[in-house]
Image: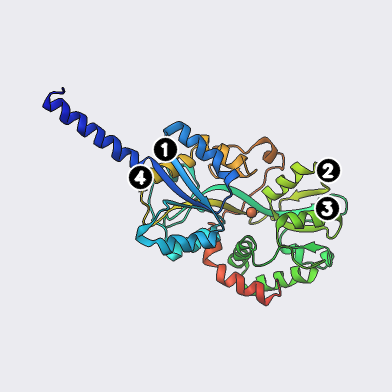
């Protein structure tokens, strides 16, 4: 038999253990696929004992689900790609801003929400890809120059419906204004060799197959295809190195407004910005770590160094509606 005082202590301890246990879980809604998030979550669970449950789907249904669940939320975190999507989530009111000295120290401010509603975790450049057989790097210079006559019938683009192109267009508007951006987009559309593609891999394959000579793609798709086909006759080019730099976008994460385990979720987000997690998270998709103290993988580094655009990526969200209107006016399908 335990003495009364000992019994009380034992009860208090078991109560504390059970409440701690309830918080030892984080639920993530992710538009990033299982194989890209499981390795980093497994590493966190192994390190801390905190279980991470996640469901994956496209960002729009996930965001709608968080909104519909409201105060009965099951998700603590929303993990998705592109600042355009994260900004939409922020504007829908489904995220809960929080500040963290660790996150502020680990992730540069241009890759975070200025309202602290989300932070970037990995970076990808949306850059030029060209045929190493039919194009010399000296022929290339900037996104804008792809509107020139010399590229007539030689350009491949992905659909304007994809947020990646909307975000790139948003940064063009920020720099050049609407009128000049519309002229650039009309130039691109006029130079297309064929209809727009539904994904970046198809753009790269079209360049490789000789259907076009140049296109605009996210770097990790190049990495993915190059891994499958080391003889790919396509290379990456870093545009705008004399002026505003290469468009960089991100994957990122935000705490949901009614997160059931907010403290455990914040601790996970903080850890995701540390070097240990950054390496796993970026390397598995051939991306650049968002924490500048962490070098990219050897493979990603082999693509060469470049000057990135330093505009805050949330511009992509702020100007998204305008970008969609301009793309439509320019005839970009
Ligand atoms: Fe993608």
User: Does mark 3's beta carbon lie closer than 8 Å to ligand 1?
Assistant: no
Q: Residue furthest bottom?
A: 329
Q: Which residue is mark 2?
A: 231
Residue 229, given in percent of the width and then of the height, sits at 80, 43
Q: Which residue is mark 4?
A: 263
Query: Callout 2: 10 Å neighbours few (<14), some, many (20+)?
Result: few
Q: How is the image coloured?
A: rainbow
**Marks 1/3: CA–CA distance:** 45 Å
Relative to 177, say whether 313 is above or below. Answer: above
Q: Which residue is mark 3?
A: 208
Q: Quadrant of ligand 1?
A: bottom right
**Marks 4/3: CA–CA distance:** 48 Å
In-front residue for pair 64/287 = 64
Query: Callout 1: 10 Å neighbours few (<14), some, many (20+)?
Result: many
First reached walking from the N terminus: tag 1 or tag 3: 1
First reached walking from the N terminus: tag 3 or tag 2: 3
Q: Residue at x 70, y 70 (%)?
A: 185
């Amino acid at each position: 038999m335990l003495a009364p005082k000992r019994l009380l202590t034992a009860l208090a301890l078991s109560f504390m253990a059970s409440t701690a246990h309830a918080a030892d879980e984080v639920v993530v809604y992710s538009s990033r696929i299982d194989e890209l998030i499981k390795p980093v979550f497994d590493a966190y669970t192994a390190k801390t004992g905190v279980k991470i449950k996640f469901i994956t789907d496209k960002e729009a249904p996930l965001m709608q689900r968080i909104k519909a669940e409201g105060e009965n939320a099951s998700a603590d975190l929303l993990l998705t790609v592109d600042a355009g999507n994260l900004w939409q989530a922020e504007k829908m009111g489904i995220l809960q801003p929080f500040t963290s000295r660790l996150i502020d120290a680990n992730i540069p401010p241009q890759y975070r929400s200025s309202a602290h509603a989300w932070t970037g975790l990995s970076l990808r450049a949306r850059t030029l890809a060209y045929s190493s057989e039919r194009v010399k790097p000296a022929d290339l210079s900037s996104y804008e120059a792809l509107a020139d006559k010399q590229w007539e019938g030689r350009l491949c683009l992905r659909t304007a419906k994809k947020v990646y192109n909307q975000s790139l267009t948003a940064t063009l508007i920020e720099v050049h204004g609407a009128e000049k951006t519309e002229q650039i987009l009309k130039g691109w559309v006029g130079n297309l060799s064929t209809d727009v593609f539904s994904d970046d891999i198809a753009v790269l394959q079209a360049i490789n197959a000789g259907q076009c000579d140049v296109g605009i793609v996210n770097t990790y798709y190049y990495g993915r295809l190059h891994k499958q086909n080391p003889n790919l006759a396509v290379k990456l080019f870093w545009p705008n190195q004399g002026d505003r730099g290469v468009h960089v976008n991100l994957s990122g994460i935000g705490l949901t407004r009614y997160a059931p385990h907010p403290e455990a979720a914040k601790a996970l987000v903080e850890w995701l910005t540390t070097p240990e997690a950054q390496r796993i998270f970026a390397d598995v998709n051939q991306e650049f770590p968002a924490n500048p103290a962490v070098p990219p993988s050897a493979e990603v580094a082999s693509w060469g160094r470049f000057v990135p655009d330093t505009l805050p990526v949330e511009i992509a969200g702020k100007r998204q509606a305008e970008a969609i209107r301009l793309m439509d006016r320019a005839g970009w399908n």
